[in-house]
Image (cartoon, rainbow, N blue to C red):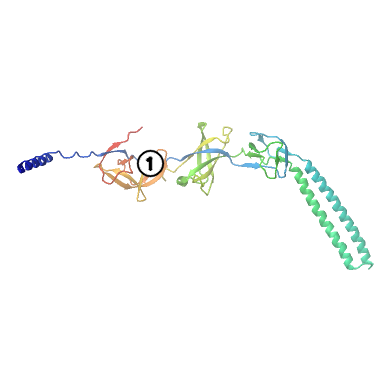
Amino acid sequence: MKKILIGCLLIVLLSDCSKPPPAEVPPRPALVTVVGEKTSAQGMILVGEVRPRYESSQGFRVDGKITKRNVDVGTLVKKGQVLAYLDSLDNHLNVTAALAAVSAAEADKNLALAELNRQRQLFTKKFISASALDIKEAQYITASSKLAQVKAQAQVTENQMQYVNLSSDRDGVVTMIHAEPGQVIQTGDVIVTIADTQATDVSIAVPESRMSEVKLNAQVMVRLWTNQTETYTGVVREISPIADAATRAFNVRITINHADAAIKLGMTAGVHFNVDPLAISGFLIPSRALTEINNKCVVWVIDDNNKAQPREVIMGPFTEAGVLIKAGLQVGEKVAIAGVHTLIKDQVVKPIVEMAP
C-alpha cells in the first residue's frame, strides 16, 4: 500500500513539472506623437462683445410724475434733446412762492434801512443812545441776510423748474427704457440709458494665464462673427487691474479704429492678439500629454527601447492646437499622449503613433 501512495505522488510531481511556463505579458499599447520642428506661438484669439465706450443712465433731478416720453429704445438722440417731461404744476407754485418770499424780504430790508437812517439822525442829535442805534443796525443786517437767503432759495426753485425736462447729455442711441408716462419717480431714478455711438469698444475677458500676452496700447485685429472676411484694426485701451471674482479673468477693452455702420452694439467679435515669434517658440504637442509629478510639469518620453521615461519640461502658452514646450524635448522623440497618469518609469510599451486627422 505504501508503494502505491509513493507512486501516485511521483506521478503528480512529474505532471506538475511538465506544465508549460506562463506566457509573457505583452507590452501595453501607448498612443504617442512624434515631436516635430519648433513652431512659434500663434496670436491669442478671444471672443467678446461690442460695447459702447460711454454709456450713461439718465434721470430727473427732482421728484414728480412723468407726463410724456419722447424716445423709445433705438432712438438716435442729440445732446440737449428733451427725452421726457414731468408734471410741472407743483414746480410753478414753488417758483411763485419763492418770488413772493423775495418780495417780502426786500420790503423788510427797505423798512430796516429806513429805520436805520432815522435812528442815525436821532443819534447825531443825541436823542438816542448808541445801543439803540446798534439794535437798528443789527436789524438791517439781518434783513439784508434774509433777502440774500430767499433769493438763493428762489434761484434753486427756478433751476428745479428747468429740471422737469430731462435732456440728453450726449449724442447717442437709447438702449434701455426704465420708466413710462404716469409713473411717479424720485430724484435720481434711472429713466433712460444712452450709449455713445461715436466710440465703440470690444469687451473681452482674458484668462489670468494669458495676461502676459496683453499689453496696453497694443495693436490687435477684430473680426465680427457676422462677417469673417472683414477685418478691423483696434488697440488695447483699458486693462482691469483686478480679476473678476467669479471667472478669475481680467476684463479688457479694445477700441475699434474707424468703426462703420456694420458694427452694431451687442455683436459678437473675435479679437486676435499678435505675439512676437521670437519671444515664444517651442515644440507643439497635445495638451493631454502633460501631467504633474512632484509639482513639476512632466511628459512621458518613449525611448529607443520602448520604455516610458518621465521628463520635466518647461511649458509655454496653450493654443487651440495644443501646448508649446519651450524646453525639455528634441525633434523626433516620441511622447505619450494617452493614459499618462497610469504610466510608470521603465514600463515597456508598444508605441502607436497618432495619425493626423
**Residue at the image position 11 percent from the left and 42 percent from the top:** 13
Does the rendering let one see residue 316? yes
Residue 19, image x, y percentages: 14, 38
- Looking at the rendered image, the quarter that the N terminus falls into is top left
Q: Is residue 132 left or right of residue 349?
A: right
Residue 103, image x, y percentages: 86, 50
User: Front-most of 342 and 46?
Assistant: 342
Q: In this view, does 244 lie to the left or right of 189?
A: left
User: Front-most of 95 and 80?
Assistant: 95
- Looking at the rendered image, the quarter that the C terminus falls into is top left
Residue 81, image x, y percentages: 70, 38
**Residue at the image position 84 percent from the left and 57 percent from the top:** 143
The residue wearing badge 1 is 287
190, above or below 121, in the image:
above
**Residue 323 position by quadrant:** top left
Report the label total: 1
User: Front-most of 81 and 297?
Assistant: 297
Q: In this view, does 238 lie to the left or right of 117?
A: left
**Residue at the image position 86 percent from the left and 51 percent from the top:** 104
126, above or below 331, in the image:
below
Query: Mark 1 Cα within 10 Å, few/some/many (few <14, many 20+)?
Result: some
Q: What residue type is labelled 1?
A: Ser
**Residue at the image position 75 percent from the left and 45 percent from the top:** 160
Question: Can you name the residue that lies furthest to the front here?
Answer: 1
Does the rendering let one see residue 329? no
**Helix, strand or loop under label 1:** helix
Residue 120, image x, y percentages: 91, 63
